[in-house]
Image (cartoon, grey):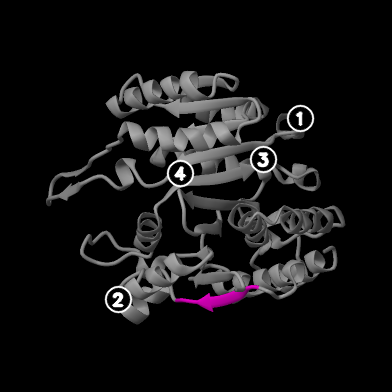
């Protein structure tokens, strides 16, 4: 049977970068994949009243991989807890598919060193991976709300911590930096204890260091080459991975993978739906292409095809490709052709 990929274009520029991503994917797999598209996020709210329908979740669970573009926009922004939000689709998808590990590689490309807000000598040779726990912590804890008070419970169990720590140690070349707030939070004290014990028991050959989240945030911009793998919980990982993304000069360049113990992973660019440029043809599709590469590598074990896409993106940039977010004028179609001709 042909591998089946569920496409969730979502909102804003999502549909505009999904179609070219399939062009690039087909170029390296000879068109042997099958695709099935579903509404997701704000588009699904408009059509069905919910960001993620049971039918879409069921289709995703039967697939071999899920390729997601972007969700959200001002149209659906609300502080009313009774109204649906596009982001609820992301949380439902992660929970429904058991996606507990989010992987975000951050490796500034030489062609784009000058695009970074940091000095070239600071970011040169940076090659790090943020491993974020995705289904626990404050985002999934019990929530309360009255007119004058609100609460969000942050809960972690030892098995949840060990599970994500194994992913980080398994991905590390030499060092795992575990990030917490153990000087204040009880969940962080359990986190630090569980990671330390697992390290000693199963991964003694990998160096382990612990950093408080504020120190880690400062070191990311002061000495990003220090990091190999950053391991952290849900909210800290959300913030630190976006900070790390800016090392590359544009959040429009970074892919991500969300993986579970078994079943399909979800592969998506880090950037949002950019509603301000939707429909203008200016969207940078490169992070979506690199997300396709992560899907090939982590979802299908197709290393050669993944590397072919990554090197095509590298070469296109080295040849001068620049979309507006990178200071250039190339539109989505021109960026796609520049990559396709290098495959």
Q: How many marks?
A: 4
Would you name the residue on which mark 1 appears?
121
Reply above or below: 285 against 1. above
* Image quadrant where one finds the N terminus: bottom right
Would you name the residue on which mark 2 appears?
49
| SS assignment at label 2 | loop
**Magenta-drawn segment:** 33-38
The residue at the point 34 percent across, 43 percent down is 136
- Is residue 331 at all visible to an observer of this figure? no
- Percent of width and height locating residue 293: 67, 57
Camera-nearest residue between 32 and 268: 32
C-alpha distance separating marks 2 and 3: 41 Å
Which marked residue is nearer to the observer: mark 2 or mark 3? 2
Contact, mark 4 vs mark 3 (Cβ under 8 Å): no
Camera-nearest residue between 109 and 206: 206
The residue at the point 29 percent across, 76 percent down is 49
> In the rendered structure, which disc, 4 or 3, sits on the residue that comes first in sequence?
3
Contact, mark 2 vs mark 1 (Cβ under 8 Å): no
User: What crowding class fits label 2: few (fewer than 14 Cα within 10 Å), some (14-19), or many (20 or more)?
Assistant: some
Q: Main secondary structure of the magenta part?
A: strand
Contact, mark 1 vs mark 4 (Cβ under 8 Å): no
């Amino acid at each position: 049977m042909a591998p089946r990929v569920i496409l969730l274009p979502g909102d804003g520029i999502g549909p505009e970068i999904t179609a070219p991503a399939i062009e690039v994917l087909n170029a390296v797999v000879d068109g042997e994949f099958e695709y099935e598209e579903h509404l997701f996020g704000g588009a699904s709210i408009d059509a069905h009243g919910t960001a993620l329908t049971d039918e879409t979740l069921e289709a995703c669970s039967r697939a071999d991989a899920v390729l997601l573009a972007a969700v959200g926009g001002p149209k659906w922004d609300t502080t009313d807890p009774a109204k649906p939000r596009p982001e609820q689709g992301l949380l439902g998808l992660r929970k429904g598919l058991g996606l507990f590990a989010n992987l975000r590689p951050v490796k500034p490309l030489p062609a784009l060193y000058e695009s970074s807000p940091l000095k070239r000598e600071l970011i040169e040779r940076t090659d790090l991976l943020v491993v974020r726990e995705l289904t626990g912590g404050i985002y999934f804890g019990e929530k309360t709300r009255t007119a004058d008070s609100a609460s969000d419970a942050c809960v972690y169990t030892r098995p949840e911590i060990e599970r994500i720590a194994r992913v980080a140690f398994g991905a590390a070349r030499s060092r795992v930096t575990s990030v917490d707030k153990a000087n204040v939070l009880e969940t962080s004290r359990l986190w630090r204890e569980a990671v330390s014990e697992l390290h000693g028991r199963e991964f003694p050959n990998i160096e382990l260091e612990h950093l408080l989240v504020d120190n880690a945030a400062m070191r990311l911009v002061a000495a990003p080459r220090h990091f190999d793998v950053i391991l952290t919980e849900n909210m800290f990982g959300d913030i630190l991975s976006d900070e790390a993304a800016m090392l590359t000069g544009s959040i429009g360049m970074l892919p991500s993978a969300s993986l579970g113990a078994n079943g399909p992973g979800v592969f998506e660019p880090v950037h949002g739906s950019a509603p301000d440029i939707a429909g203008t043809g200016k969207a940078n599709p490169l992070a979506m292409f690199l997300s396709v590469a992560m899907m090939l590598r982590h979802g299908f074990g197709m290393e050669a095809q993944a590397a072919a896409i990554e090197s095509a993106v590298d070469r296109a940039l080295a040849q001068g490709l620049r979309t507006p977010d990178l200071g250039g004028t190339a539109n989505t179609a021109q960026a796609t052709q520049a990559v396709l001709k290098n495959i």
